[in-house]
Image (cartoon, rainbow, N blue to C red):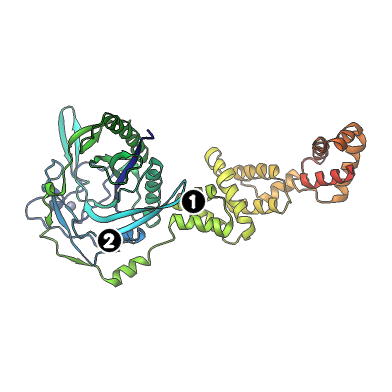
């Protein structure tokens, strides 16, 4: 970015909770790909007199999110009406939370180029989704299947200073809600959405800028990145001319990240928040909190740090393994009874060769991932060479034969009989006198002899031992 300016970003992330029913009625909240207006009732249509009843599980999931993000929990929380008009909001208000959100004052630590950085979480609150407007040939249709689906809103402090911090945060957040079964956070289904609050200030300034641009309804992390790039260009051009960008809400034109002015940004007073009279205060007991706290599991960042610290797994391998629940579970099952000294090597093979096979080859149903551990153990014990181990893995994966069978069939056992190796080395050295001479003058030239000996041994010996033997004979 233009080095004259520093980026100031705050994020609001909406996550759709994984509940059977909607937030305030018993309609099925699993509406994806269902015919319009088939998951509806008087409550989600907003008909007069229909009474909302809060979904207990949704409230629990919101508490769980708050706990995972180190928030304080409001002991008495309440719902409020956020008033605004929109065709897909039939009540004329959305039930949300205003001054007593479920979670407050939390944080999430993310990795940055200069170490861990703590991003402040202002609040975590529970609300309901709106319906959906479908525009078609100049007509607008309304589908209320989405109306009333529970959403958790996670609001950050304006703590982000780079685009990379934003994407790291979004990815960690997505992992956390998936680890904790709070949400599937499937962006293609709109289950995780972003709102960006962004401004720029001159490098070196410490106070927050006197304007803020909001971009709503960003459906993916890649589009979010493009919006940030676009807004950096747009806002810095205005600032370069000595002017201040307008405080406003901007909308996405398309997926390129370009935005256009929609309206001057509304402030809280415009929404005329007031307590939802149809829902009583909700008390959250210590007992409830401690019960939910017990549902928490080791979170991605902690898991990564433990892998690195306890097993010496390389950071990039650890990051790949923790990226999703299925992957870390498979890996942890795999190494459950494995010698600690081998685990970092298993991680390397698992994220390298094994992932490549999964992407490129057809797996035989007989293949068991535990073969990988068996193979890596043989490699570290120098009972099979790396190159042969790779071949054996591919063959086992595609044919379902066991590693043992393949090693036997192909004669992959490493020759560890030093007498046999010495015989081969002696023959090679006596039939290549010039190479021996060269190697005496220049030790690098000995690699030719090593290569010849390894060829004679069909690659089934430990190259380092062969080299050591040759070097000792050159003296
Ligand atoms: Zn309903």
Asked whether, in this view, residue 346 is left or right of residue 464, the answer is left
Which of the numbered marks, if any, corresponds to residue 57? 2
Dividing the picture into quadrants, the one containing residue 445 is top right
Find the distance from the CA under tag 2 to the CA under tag 1: 27 Å
Around disc 2, counting alpha carbons within 10 Å, would you say few (fewer than 14), some (14 to 19), or many (20 or more)?
some
Residue occupying the far left of the picture: 48
Q: State the image coordinates of residue 110 (x, y, percent, origin top left).
A: 42, 51
Of callouts 2 and 1, which one flags the residue occurring earlier in the amino acid sequence?
A: 2
Q: Nearer the viewer, residue 239 or 427?
A: 239
Quarter that holds the C terminus:
top right
Q: Is residue 22 above or below residue 437?
A: below
| Visible residue check, residue 208 | yes
Give the residue at x 44% y 60%: 298
Residue occupying the far top of the picture: 137
Residue occupying the far front of the picture: 204
Q: State the image coordinates of residue 105 (x, y, percent, origin top left).
A: 29, 59
Q: State the image coordinates of residue 149 (x, y, percent, origin top left).
A: 23, 51
Residue occupying the far bottom of the picture: 287
Which of the numbered marks, if any, corresponds to residue 114? none
* Disc 2 to disc 1: CB gap under 8 Å: no
Around disc 1, counting alpha carbons within 10 Å, would you say few (fewer than 14), some (14 to 19), or many (20 or more)?
some
| Visible residue check, residue 21 | no
Q: State the image coordinates of residue 419 (x, y, percent, origin top left).
A: 88, 50
Give the residue at x 38% y 57%: 180
Quarter that holds the N terminus:
top left
Asked whether, in this view, residue 350 is left or right of residue 377, the answer is left
Which of the numbered marks, if any, corresponds to residue 327? 1
> What secondary structure is marked by label 2?
helix
């Amino acid at each position: 970015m233009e080095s004259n300016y520093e980026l100031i970003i705050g994020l609001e992330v909406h996550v759709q909770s994984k509940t059977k029913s909607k937030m305030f009625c018993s309609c099925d909240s699993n509406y994806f790909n269902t015919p319009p207006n088939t998951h509806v009732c008087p409550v989600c249509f907003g008909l007069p007199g229909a009474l909302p009843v809060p979904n207990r599980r949704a409230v629990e999931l919101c508490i769980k999110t708050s706990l995972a993000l180190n928030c304080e929990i409001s002991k008495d929380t309440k719902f409020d009406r956020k008033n605004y008009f929109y065709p897909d909001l039939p009540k004329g208000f959305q039930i949300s939370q205003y001054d007593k959100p479920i979670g407050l004052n939390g944080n999430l630590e993310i990795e940055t180029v200069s170490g861990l950085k703590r991003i402040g979480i202002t609040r975590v609150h529970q609300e309901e989704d709106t319906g959906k407007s479908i525009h078609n040939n100049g007509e607008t249709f309304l589908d209320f299947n989405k109306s009333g689906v529970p959403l958790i809103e996670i609001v950050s402090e304006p703590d982000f200073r780079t685009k990379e911090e934003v994407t790291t945060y979004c990815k960690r957040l997505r992992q956390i809600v998936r680890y904790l079964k709070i949400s599937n956070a499937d962006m293609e289904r709109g289950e995780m959405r972003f709102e960006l609050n962004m401004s720029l200030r001159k490098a070196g300034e410490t106070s927050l800028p006197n304007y803020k641009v909001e971009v709503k309804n960003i459906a993916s992390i890649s589009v979010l990145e493009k919006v940030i790039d676009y807004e950096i260009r747009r806002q810095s051009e205005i600032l370069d001319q000595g002017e201040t960008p307008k405080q406003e809400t901007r909308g996405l034109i398309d997926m390129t990240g370009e935005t256009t002015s929609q309206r001057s940004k509304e402030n809280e007073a415009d929404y005329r928040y007031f307590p939802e009279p149809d829902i009583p205060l909700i008390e959250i007991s210590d007992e409830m909190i401690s019960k939910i706290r017990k549902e928490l599991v080791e979170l991605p960042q902690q898991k990564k740090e433990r892998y690195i610290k306890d097993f010496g797994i390389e950071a990039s391998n650890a990051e790949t393994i923790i990226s999703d629940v299925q992957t870390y579970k498979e890996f942890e099952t795999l190494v459950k009874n494995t010698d600690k000294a081998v685990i970092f090597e298993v991680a390397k093979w698992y994220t390298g060769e094994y992932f490549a096979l999964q992407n490129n080859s057809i797996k035989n149903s007989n293949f068991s991932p535990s073969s990988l551990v068996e193979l890596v153990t043989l490699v570290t014990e120098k009972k099979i060479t790396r190159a042969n181990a790779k071949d054996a893995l591919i063959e086992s994966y595609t044919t379902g034969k066991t590693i043992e069978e393949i090693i036997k069939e192909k004669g992959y056992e490493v020759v560890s009989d030093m007498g046999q190796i010495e015989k081969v080395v002696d023959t090679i050295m006596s039939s290549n006198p010039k190479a021996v001479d060269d190697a005496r003058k220049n030790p690098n030239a000995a690699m030719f002899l090593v290569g010849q000996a390894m060829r004679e041994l069909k690659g089934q010996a430990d190259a380092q031992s062969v080299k050591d033997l040759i070097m000792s004979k050159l003296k």
